[in-house]
């Protein structure tokens, strides 16, 4: 445990970007071209610096993390806890007393997410070099997004959670809407409204829970003894509790996203600038499944037992549907590489759902590990697409070919990323997929076997794309150098800044493929406790 | 040497090629041609250690079963995922196969790939392939096996697509990987069933539990299903029907790669897997395996007859021979199946490297003649190479003799054993198709191999290019010589007509089945188990014990022994044991292999009967040996004879025959239209379905979202109008009313003080009047 | 007939009415001011009358004193305004001075 000015490590890591924003606000962007050119580098390096400090803090937290503590529903075994009054109003009409606490802490479920967020924000700041306009605004928004995401993962108070959840929406809207592609307004509004639609459900459930429990503390909500008699959500497996679970589930499912709530994703990804795609796929999608783990599952355990089969089914459908749609991108529309990867995200997040539905150690560990791995691998994939898009200004699969000789290092990195996405052993995606399948099979043999088809389809669309881009002959139009003037791209292969973004991720992907224990160890205690707690709470069959 | 040293050495064996890969891939430009020497010398070290390991294992630890090293990969809190290394006799022999061929291919490629611009990368890929292949060999659990299984898939993908500028090469790599993935899907599903049931990936744990009568889902059928699913991995990797289509395409890769990966080692991994899971295969699963093998052997042989591409003939020959091995294991002829794997590895690697030598020479000749339009792999362009390339020719000839099953070669020993097995299987079960497929494939093999040999090497050169070829240098000829020398029978058995008497057979006896007797062929179940199925701690370790049996021993029976110690002696079966009655089972819980073997002997002893084999199949094979040998000799001879009459002496013109059997010829020439059928069915369906779904997603799902958006927008519009007209109308109305009054009232405001005063007074008076 | 409170009040009322009449009808600002004076004086007369016949006593006298002082001040201010009006408008006709309307 360490603290600075009485602020705990979690507060520091969360609000560090705020400091960065203030610093940037004080630096003038300049009005003429020359000043703008000069100032944009300040903004870039300030962002890199702050996210790097954040990453160091995250590693420090990892080093000090005690993986033997339970967490989940027990406030005493959360770590780095900070809890003090934030909003305290008394004697309100109808509400009575309203107490909202600034209550943060992490356990084995959220700790990997902290690491992931810090890592992705750091590397994505390098891929922000491709941003072409309004740097000051961009980087300020970027750090605000960072703040919101980090906040979601540390909150143990539902109200606080909700505040951060909404806080992150706003910069995302602008980041897509201002710095995005041709249909950016459409995509940004679609994203915003879709997720806001989900948040509304969450808000309703949050208020209902507040009336039942009299507190916004998530851990209080997990204990049935705290529910006041006669409240709407009091009881066991009542209609209202099931409805509340569905509402909460839909709220999170939109974020994941699972079929059929997924259509905002391809649009948002296609239109968003590269670093924002990276963050969207790398961190934002995890919030949905994280919310299920942190909120929906422990608070409504009996509803999980009730809907378990359907959730597994949804997971299976997402896996196959996403994979087939990704494969279909080779046949339809503009054959957009980025869109294909967006659909592969749908498929890969389906594994997480399957693991969560299985509710056993392999399944849930696999699901959380898959959340982390999908974050790093898909981040790599989007950056890789960004690299060629920046050079060629197209992402159409048909327009490439034979890049392997033009860009050998890039090809090597892309091969790692693609094979990681396929689930090749030795790379991190394999371990999590195997765990999810092993866990899934224990609970749902048939559905899991069908889901395994996803890895066959995954190989098909990924290799297809790999071949289209890298193998065969180089088209006439790309024969020359990317940038004849030599100003932006000195040589044809990937440049140092892009390597700085990709190499750390590649190292993480390989390292976790060989030594998955480094990350899995920190979550097992919490996950086992989580499963036991939810199973007992839900009176699962056989417990 | 202790067990630990041995396992450590095999771990070194595993990691050295990986080191080579990492070292080369990051230093491609710096190393240049030295990458080749570096990789080759690493493999040389590896070869030596592997020979030491294997020799030690086969002598010092011969009876020790599988030496294992297990460690936790990662922990899941209440249990761990355990992986490890294992070395048994099977793995020890396989280790030599992989390392020797890999070493020779490294050597060969120093010349063959000399001019390639990605020379260092080629060696890096060879390194990662060797690493993953050794990983499969020394796995002691399914998870390890699956991991390295996928990694060989990756290296195969990279090497097939090594010349990725060619679309056909890139396509072939992709096809190989995806086809293999389909097989792996089944393999993984099988692993899931086993892990779910037994909570472990370890071979020994799983087999022990099956032996104890634990079945997946408490159901013998599910054990069959698990076995078949695991075998699906082998179907993919070993290019068995119906997933064999990728292997001929894989010939797009450089020829040394074809020799190493697609003939000798990686494709044999499927056979190796089938051998590994042999103890847990039920009767139904074995029958499935046997049929798949037989069908593959037959179909591929028919296709090989009509192909004109040098490497395609060899590729289909490989598929056919792999089918042979699979079939052998399926009928229960475990040892001969594996024997054929080893023997085939040598001569097929030799044949492929020989073809590489020919192609290399043809290329050189073409370069000299500045001819770049001819196909250097087409046998119709060759002929007469015998005199020009004598080393290549004689090694090729020797390998062709071996693959055709001519006596005094390893190929004869293994093939003869397999055919005897199929004959025994046919007589025991009535599945004569397998016997038929085995023999007809043998005949066709002899025919097409000699057709290839004669067309390429004999006669006069058919082109100018072929006439100007020259023998290649030592990098190429040395591997050929080494490989052809070790196809000699003496390396495996001193009796050239019976492989069953050699060391190979006796070191690699079939492991006893662990499947409960009611789900297994009765002729494969060891007698003492069949009798009462009284105990089930059978395990892999039983095999060395079997090796001790002496088929000709007589007497020495020990019919009523109670203690184990005195029974512990080699070859003390009672030759008259055949009864099926009750068995004394004292001390059978003891898992120790040696005692267990004694137990088995004990059981035999109790039931006086005329039996000296562990199970009936072995005996039947032995009985079928002589007739099988005679038939196979006749068949091989006739195949060779027909080839000579057609192609050497030209007694018949092959084209007239083709004219007579046109439909069959076309079927064979077009590879039974498998690719066309797949393209038109599964692939078409998947792609069409994915396209439909992508369209559905774009138009229907997203369309619904957009429709909702549009409707909400429309409602907003209507509400907007309502708001403008009605709500805002009311507001405006009140405002205008007030305005009207204002207009009226402003008249009173004259600005004149006196008028105000008057009004004040009037008001005051009114006030007074009303209030007071 | 002895002079009583009623007589004083009647005189005072007449005086008040005359004052109001003067204010309302006169156009000349000076005359309006004079009307105002009449009203004030009628109030004074009332105070004196109530001081003598009512119970006001000394307070009535004091009020009168105040009013006389007040009236003087008021006249001073008012005449100053009138003077200013005259300077701006060049007349002091109250009918024409209606800028209060705006």
Image (tube, coloured by chain):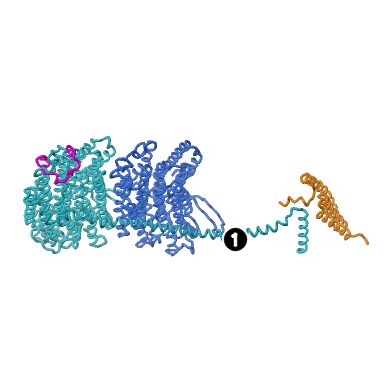
Chain colours: A blue, B cyan, C orange
Residue B542 visible here? no
| Picture quarter with the N terminus of chain A | top left
Is A237 left or right of B361, judged from the image as shown? Answer: right
Q: What segment is highlighted magenta in the picture?
A: B366-392
Q: Is residue B371 one of those drawn in magenta?
A: yes
**A346 vs B397: above or below:** below
Is A284 left or right of B733, judged from the image as shown? Answer: left
Measured as percent of width and height from the top left, residue B416 is found at 10, 53
Q: Residue at x 78, y 51 (%)?
A: C94
Q: Which is nearer the eye, B639 or B451?
A: B451
Residue projecting furthest to the right? C1
What is the crowding at mark 1: few (fewer than 14 residues within 10 Å), some, or many (at least 20)? few
Is B45 left or right of A507, judged from the image as shown? Answer: left
Is A191 left or right of B344, judged from the image as shown? Answer: right
| Residue bearing the label numbered 1 | B730
Q: Residue at x 72, y 55 (%)?
A: B749
């Amino acid at each position: 445990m360490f603290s600075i000015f009485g602020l705990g490590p979690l507060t520091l890591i969360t609000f560090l970007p705020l400091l960065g924003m203030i610093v940037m606000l004080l630096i003038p962007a300049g009005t003429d071209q020359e000043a703008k050119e000069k100032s944009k580098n300040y903004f870039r390096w300030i962002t890199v610096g702050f996210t790097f400090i954040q990453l160091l803090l995250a590693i420090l937290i990892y080093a000090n993390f005690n993986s033997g503590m339970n967490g989940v529903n027990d406030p005493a075994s959360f770590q780095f806890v900070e809890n003090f009054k934030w909003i305290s109003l008394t004697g309100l009409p109808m509400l009575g007393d309203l107490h909202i606490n600034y209550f943060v802490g992490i356990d084995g479920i959220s700790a990997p997410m902290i690491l992931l967020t810090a890592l992705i924000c750091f590397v994505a700041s390098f891929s922000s070099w491709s941003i072409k306009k309004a740097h000051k605004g961009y980087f300020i928004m970027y750090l605000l997004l960072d703040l919101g995401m980090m906040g979601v993962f540390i909150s143990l108070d539902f109200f606080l959670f909700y505040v951060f959840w909404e806080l992150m929406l706003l910069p995302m809207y602008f980041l897509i809407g201002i710095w995005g592609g041709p249909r950016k307004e459409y995509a940004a509004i679609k994203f915003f409204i879709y997720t806001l639609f989900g948040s509304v459900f969450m808000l309703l459930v949050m208020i209902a829970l507040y009336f039942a429990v009299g507190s916004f503390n998530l851990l209080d909500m997990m204990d049935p003894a705290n529910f006041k008699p006669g409240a709407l959500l009091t009881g066991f497996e009542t209609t209202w509790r099931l409805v509340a679970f569905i509402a909460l589930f839909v709220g999170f499912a939109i974020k994941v996203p699972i079929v059929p709530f997924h259509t905002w994703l391809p649009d948002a990804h296609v239109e968003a600038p590269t670093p924002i795609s990276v963050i969207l796929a790398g961190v934002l999608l995890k919030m949905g499944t994280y919310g299920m783990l942190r909120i929906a599952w422990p608070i409504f355990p009996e509803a999980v037992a009730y809907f378990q089969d359907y959730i597994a089914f949804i997971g299976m459908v997402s896996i196959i549907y996403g994979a087939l749609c990704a494969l279909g991108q080779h046949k339809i529309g503009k054959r957009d590489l980025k869109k294909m990867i967006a659909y592969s995200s749908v498929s890969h997040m389906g594994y997480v759902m399957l693991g969560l539905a299985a509710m056993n150690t392999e399944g849930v560990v696999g699901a959380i590990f898959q959340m982390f791995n999908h974050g790093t691998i898909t981040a790599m994939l989007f950056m890789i697409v960004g690299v060629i898009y920046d050079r060629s200004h197209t992402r159409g699969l048909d327009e490439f070919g034979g890049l392997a000789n033009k860009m050998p290092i890039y090809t090597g990195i892309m091969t790692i990323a693609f094979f990681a996405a396929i689930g090749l052993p030795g790379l991190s995606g394999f371990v999590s997929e195997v765990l999810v399948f092993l866990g899934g099979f224990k609970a749902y043999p048939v559905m899991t076997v069908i889901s395994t088809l996803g890895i066959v389809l995954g190989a098909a669309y990924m290799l297809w794309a790999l071949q289209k881009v890298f193998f065969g002959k180089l088209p006439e139009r790309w024969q020359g150098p990317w940038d004849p003037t030599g100003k932006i791209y000195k040589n044809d292969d990937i440049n140092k800044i892009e390597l700085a973004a990709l190499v750390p991720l590649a190292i993480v992907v390989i390292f976790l493929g060989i030594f998955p224990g480094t990350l899995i160890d920190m979550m097992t205690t919490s996950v086992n406790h989580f499963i036991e707690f939810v199973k007992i709470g839900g009176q699962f069959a056989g417990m | 040497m202790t067990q630990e040293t041995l396992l450590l050495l095999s771990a070194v064996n595993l990691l050295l090629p990986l080191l080579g890969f990492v070292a080369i891939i990051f230093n491609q430009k710096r190393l240049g041609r030295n990458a080749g020497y570096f990789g080759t010398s690493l493999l040389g070290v590896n070869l030596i250690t592997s020979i030491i390991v294997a020799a030690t294992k086969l002598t010092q630890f011969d009876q020790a079963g599988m030496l294992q090293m297990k460690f936790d990969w990662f922990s899941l809190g209440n249990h761990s995922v355990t992986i490890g290394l294992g070395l048994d006799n099977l793995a020890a022999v396989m280790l030599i196969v992989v390392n020797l061929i890999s070493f020779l291919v490294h050597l060969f490629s120093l010349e063959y790939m000399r001019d390639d611009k990605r020379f260092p990368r080629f060696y890096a890929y060879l390194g990662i392939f060797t690493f993953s292949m050794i990983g499969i060999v020394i796995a002691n659990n399914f998870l390890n096996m699956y991991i390295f299984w996928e990694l060989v898939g990756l290296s195969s993908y990279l090497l097939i697509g090594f010349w990725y500028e060619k679309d056909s090469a890139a396509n072939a790599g992709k096809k190989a990987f995806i086809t293999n993935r389909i097989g792996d899907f089944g393999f993984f599903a099988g692993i899931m069933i086993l892990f779910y049931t037994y909570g472990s990936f370890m071979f020994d744990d799983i087999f022990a539990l099956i032996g104890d009568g634990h079945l997946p889902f408490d159901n013998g059928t599910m054990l069959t299903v698990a076995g078949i699913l695991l075998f699906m991995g082998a179907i993919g990797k070993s290019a068995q029907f119906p997933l064999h289509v990728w292997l001929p395409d894989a010939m797009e890769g450089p020829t040394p790669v074809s020799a190493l990966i697609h003939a000798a080692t990686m494709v044999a991994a499927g056979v190796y897997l089938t051998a590994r899971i042999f103890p847990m295969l039920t009767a139904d699963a074995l029958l499935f395996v046997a049929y798949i093998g037989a069908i593959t052997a037959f179909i591929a042989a028919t296709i090989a007859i009509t192909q004109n591409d040098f490497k395609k003939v060899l590729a289909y020959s490989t598929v056919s021979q792999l089918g042979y091995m699979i079939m052998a294991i399926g009928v229960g002829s475990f040892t001969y199946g594996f024997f054929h794997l080893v023997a085939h590895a040598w001569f097929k690697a030799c044949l492929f490297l020989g073809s590489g030598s020919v192609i290399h020479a043809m290329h050189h000749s073409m370069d000299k003649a500045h001819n770049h339009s001819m196909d250097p792999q087409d046998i119709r362009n060759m002929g007469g190479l015998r005199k020009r390339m004598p080393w290549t020719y004689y090694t090729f000839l020797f390998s062709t003799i071996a693959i055709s099953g001519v006596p005094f070669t390893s190929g004869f020993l293994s093939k003869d054993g397999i055919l005897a097995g199929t004959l025994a299987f046919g007589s025991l079960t009535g599945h004569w198709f397998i016997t038929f497929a085995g023999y007809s494939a043998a005949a066709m093999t002899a025919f097409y191999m000699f057709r290839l040999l004669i067309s390429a090497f004999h006669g006069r050169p058919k082109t100018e290019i072929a006439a100007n070829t020259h023998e290649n240098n030592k990098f190429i000829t040395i591997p050929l010589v080494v490989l052809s020398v070790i196809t000699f029978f003496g390396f495996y058995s001193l009796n050239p007509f019976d492989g069953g008497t050699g060391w190979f057979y006796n070191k690699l006896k079939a492991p006893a089945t662990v499947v409960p007797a009611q789900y297994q062929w009765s002729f494969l179940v060891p007698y003492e188990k069949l009798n009462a199925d009284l105990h089930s701690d059978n395990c892999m370790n039983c095999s060395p014990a079997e090796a001790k049996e002496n088929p000709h021993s007589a007497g020495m029976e020990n019919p009523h022994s109670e203690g184990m110690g005195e029974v512990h002696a080699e070859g003390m079966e009672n030759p008259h044991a055949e009864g099926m009655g009750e068995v004394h089972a004292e001390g059978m819980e003891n898992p120790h292999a040696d005692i267990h073997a004694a137990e088995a002997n004990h059981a035999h002893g109790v039931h006086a009967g005329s039996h000296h084999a562990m199970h009936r199949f072995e005996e039947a094979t032995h009985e079928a040996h002589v007739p099988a040998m005679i038939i196979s000799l006749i068949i091989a001879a006739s195949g060779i004879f027909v080839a000579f009459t057609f192609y050497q002496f030209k007694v018949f013109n092959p084209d007239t025959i083709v004219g007579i059997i046109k439909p069959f010829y076309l079927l064979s020439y077009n590879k039974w239209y498998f690719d066309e059928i797949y393209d038109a069915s599964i692939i078409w369906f998947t792609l069409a379905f994915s396209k439909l779904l992508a369209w559905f997603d774009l138009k229907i799902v997203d369309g619904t979202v957009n429709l909702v958006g549009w409707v909400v927008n429309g409602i907003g519009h209507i509400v907007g109008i309502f708001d403008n007209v009605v709500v805002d109308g009311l507001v405006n109305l009140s405002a205008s009313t007030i305005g009207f009054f204002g207009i009226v009232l402003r008249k009173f405001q004259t600005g004149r003080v006196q008028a105000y005063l008057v009004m004040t007074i009037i008001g005051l008076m009114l006030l007074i009047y009303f209030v007071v | 007939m002895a002079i009583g409170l009623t007589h004083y009040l009647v005189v005072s009322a007449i005086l008040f009415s005359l004052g109001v009449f003067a204010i309302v009808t006169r156009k000349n600002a000076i005359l309006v001011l004079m009307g105002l004076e009449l009203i004030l004086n009628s109030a004074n007369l009332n105070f004196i009358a109530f001081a003598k016949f009512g119970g006001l006593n000394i307070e009535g006298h004091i009020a009168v004193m105040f009013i006389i002082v007040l009236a003087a001040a008021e006249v001073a201010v008012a005449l100053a305004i009138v003077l200013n009006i005259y300077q701006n408008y060049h007349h002091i006709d109250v009918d024409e001075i209606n800028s209060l309307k705006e």
